[in-house]
Structure formats: C-alpha cells, structure tokens
Image (spheres, rainbow, N blue to C red):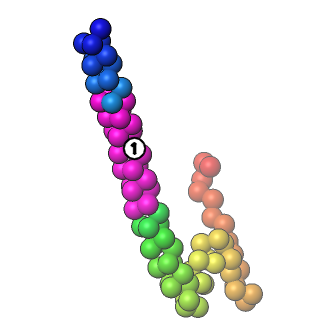
Amino acid sequence: MVLGLVILAVFVFGVFPTGSYIEQRDELRNAEQELADLRAQNAELEARIARLGSDAEIELEAREFGLVRPEEENYLIIAPGN
C-alpha cells in the first residue's frame, strides 16, 4: 500500500509538472519566434515608411499600380498568342 502511494506521489508530482513544463517551454519558444518575426516585419515596414518619404519613391510605387502622370499615356502590350 505504501509503495503504491509512493508511486502515485512520484507520478503526480513528477510526471504531470514535467509535461506542463515541456508544454510551456514549447509555447514560450513559439511566442519568441513569433515576436522575432513581428520585429523583422516591423523593421521592414519602418524602412518602407522612410523610403516613401521621398517623391521619387512614391512615384515608383504609383507606377507599379499602373498610374501615369496627366500628360502621359499608358499602353498595354499583349504578346501574340495570349
């Protein structure tokens, strides 16, 4: 009987906390990775904001969307067979 209680105590106080520790460690590792990814994305966005502070960069972005100046004409070239 005492041996059964000891085994039960070891199981309750040893196995369950270990599983919880491993689970929390994995969650922490995932959260740290997500934080690192978000910081990198934030740095990229901050750099883009800094670049968009110039008129030349804004014009490049607008041209990527097909916008042209009022005195220009926009042409669409379609390759044969398409």
Quadrant hosting residue 70? bottom right
User: What residue lies at 59% left-to-right and 77% top-to-bottom?
Assistant: 61
Q: Tell me where the magenta segment starts and ends, as one range.
A: 14-36
Q: Residue at x 27, y 19 (%)?
A: 6
- Left or right of 31, for residue 63: right
Residue 6 inside the magenta-drawn segment: no
- Where is residue 78 shown, x and y percent of the image? 63, 59
What percent of the width, then of the height, locates residue 41?
47, 66
In magenta segment, residue 32 = yes
Main SS category, magenta section: helix
Identify the residue at the far right of this view: 70
Above or below, 63 relative to 16: below
61 or 12, which lies in front? 12
Mark 1, residues whose alpha carbon is within 10 Å: few (<14), some, or many (≥20)? few
Outermost residue, front side: 2
Q: Residue furthest left?
A: 3
Determine the image quadrant of residue 14.
Answer: top left
Is residue 37 visible in the rendered image? The answer is no
Q: Secondary structure at mark 1?
A: helix
Horizontal placement of 1 versus 79: left or right?
A: left
Residue pictured at 68% horizontal, 77% vertical: 67
